Image (cartoon, helix red, strand yellow):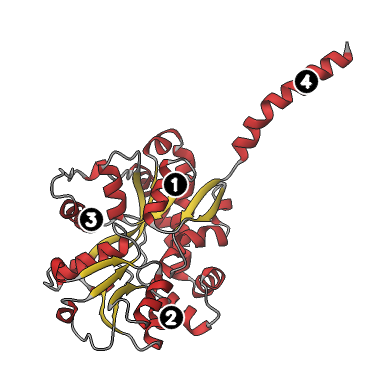
C-alpha cells in the first residue's frame, strides 16, 4: 500500500514538474547590439535592479530591431528595445505588440562621411550605408535628408551591415556615408572620416530611438510582471545617468572596447541624452508615424497613439510617486 502511495506521488510530481520549471524560467529581454544606447537594458541587469523589483529576467542579443520584433512575435522573447518606426510598422501590419516605455527620444547618431563630403548637399549622387532597410539607421537617414532638403531619390541607400561592417565599407569607399553612434564614431574619425551632423541636436529628427515593446496580449495578462520590469528599467536609466561610476562599469562590460577614454566619451554622450521618467516623446512618435506613411504611401496609417503605446503602467507609476521617489533618493 505504501509503495502504491509513493508511486502515485512520484508520478504526480513528474506531471507537475514541467509547469514548475516553466514558471521559474526567466523572461528574455533582447538588446540589439553593442552601441552605448543599449545601456538602458544593460543597467537594470548589471546593477541588480531586476532582482530588486522581483523581475526574473535575462538579457539576450538579437541584432537589429526587425529581428527582435520577429522573435517577439514568435514568442522567443518577452521584451525588446527597438526603434519606434520599426514598432509602428509592425503594429500597422497586424503585429500583437505595443510600446510601453522609452529611454532615448533622439537619434544617437553622427552622420559620418568621406572627407571630401563637407556639407549635406554633397551627398547627392552618393551611396549611404544603413544596417538594414526598414531599420532605425535608415529611418535616421531619411529624416536627416528631409531636414537638409536633400531629395531621397538623389542618393542610394543600401544595406551595408552592422556598424563595424559600415566602418570597413567607409574605409574602402564602398559607401560614402553612414550614421554611426558612440563608440563607433571615434573609430570612423580615426580612419579619416568626419562628421557632417550630430543628429541628436536636430529638432527635425526628434524620434523615439529606444522604446520597449512587448506583445499587447502579454502586457494585458501579466501586468504585475510588466510593472516590475518597468520599475527596474526606469531606475536603471536614472542610476546610469546619475552615477558615472555605475555607468562606466556597465559600459565596460558590454562595449567591445578596451580603451578607457572611448568608454568615458560614450558615457558622457549618453548620460545627458537618456530620458527620465522613461516616457515616449509624442513629437517623436508623430515623426515615426509620418515616416511609416511615407514608406507605405498606399496604406492607411492610424494616427491614434493609443494603437501603438500603452502608457497605463507608466501612468500608474506616476500616480504612485515612483519616479519622484527615485529622483529624491
Which label belongs to residue 265?
A: 2
Horizontally, is 233 left or right of 180 in the view?
Answer: right
Q: Nearer the viewer, residue 309 or 171?
A: 171
In space, the residues marked 3 and 2 are separated at their CA atoms by: 29 Å
Q: Earlier in the sequence, mark 3 or mark 1?
A: 1
C-beta proximity under 8 Å, tags 3 and 2:
no
What residue is pinned by disc 1?
Answer: 71
Q: Is residue 189 above or below residue 216?
A: below
Q: Quadrant of the N terminus?
A: top right
Q: Is residue 300 above or below residue 140?
A: above
C-beta proximity under 8 Å, tags 4 and 2:
no
In space, the residues marked 4 and 2 are separated at their CA atoms by: 60 Å
Which label belongs to residue 9?
A: 4
In space, the residues marked 3 and 4 are separated at their CA atoms by: 57 Å
In space, the residues marked 4 and 1 are separated at their CA atoms by: 38 Å
Helix, strand or loop for disc 2: helix
Which label belongs to residue 59?
A: none
Q: Residue at x 28, y 44 (%)?
A: 308
Q: Earlier in the sequence, mark 3 or mark 2?
A: 2
The spot of residue 78 in percent (x, y) is 47, 44
Amino acid at each position: 500500500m505504501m509503495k502504491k502511495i509513493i508511486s502515485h506521488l512520484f508520478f504526480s510530481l513528474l506531471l507537475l514538474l514541467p509547469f514548475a520549471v516553466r514558471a521559474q524560467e526567466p523572461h528574455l529581454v533582447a538588446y540589439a547590439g553593442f552601441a552605448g544606447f543599449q545601456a538602458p537594458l544593460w543597467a537594470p541587469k548589471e546593477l541588480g535592479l531586476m532582482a530588486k523589483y522581483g523581475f526574473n529576467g535575462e538579457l539576450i542579443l538579437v541584432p537589429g530591431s526587425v529581428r527582435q520584433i520577429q522573435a517577439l512575435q514568435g514568442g522567443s522573447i518577452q521584451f525588446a528595445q527597438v526603434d519606434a518606426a520599426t514598432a509602428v510598422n509592425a503594429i500597422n501590419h497586424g503585429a500583437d505588440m505595443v510600446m510601453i516605455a522609452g529611454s532615448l527620444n533622439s537619434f544617437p547618431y553622427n552622420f559620418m562621411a568621406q572627407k571630401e563630403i563637407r556639407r549635406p548637399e554633397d551627398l547627392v549622387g552618393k551611396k549611404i550605408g544603413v544596417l538594414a532597410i526598414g531599420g532605425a539607421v535608415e529611418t535616421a537617414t531619411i529624416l536627416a535628408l528631409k531636414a537638409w532638403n536633400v531629395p531621397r531619390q538623389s542618393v542610394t541607400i543600401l544595406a551595408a551591415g552592422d556598424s563595424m561592417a559600415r566602418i570597413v565599407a567607409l574605409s574602402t569607399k564602398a559607401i560614402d556615408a553612414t550614421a554611426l553612434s558612440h563608440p563607433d564614431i571615434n573609430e570612423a574619425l580615426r580612419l579619416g572620416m568626419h562628421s557632417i551632423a550630430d543628429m541628436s541636436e536636430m529638432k527635425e529628427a526628434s524620434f523615439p530611438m529606444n522604446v520597449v515593446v512587448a506583445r499587447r496580449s502579454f502586457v494585458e495578462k501579466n501586468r504585475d510582471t510588466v510593472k516590475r520590469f518597468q520599475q527596474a528599467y526606469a531606475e536603471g536609466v536614472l542610476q546610469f545617468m546619475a552615477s558615472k561610476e555605475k555607468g562606466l562599469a556597465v559600459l565596460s562590460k558590454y562595449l567591445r572596447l578596451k580603451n578607457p577614454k572611448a568608454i568615458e566619451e560614450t558615457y558622457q554622450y549618453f548620460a545627458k541624452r537618456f530620458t527620465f521618467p522613461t516616457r515616449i516623446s509624442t513629437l517623436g512618435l508623430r515623426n515615426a508615424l509620418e515616416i511609416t506613411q511615407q514608406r507605405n504611401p498606399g496604406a492607411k496609417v492610424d494616427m491614434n497613439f493609443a494603437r501603438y503605446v500603452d502608457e497605463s503602467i507608466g501612468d500608474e507609476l506616476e500616480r504612485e510617486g515612483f519616479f519622484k521617489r527615485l529622483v529624491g533618493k
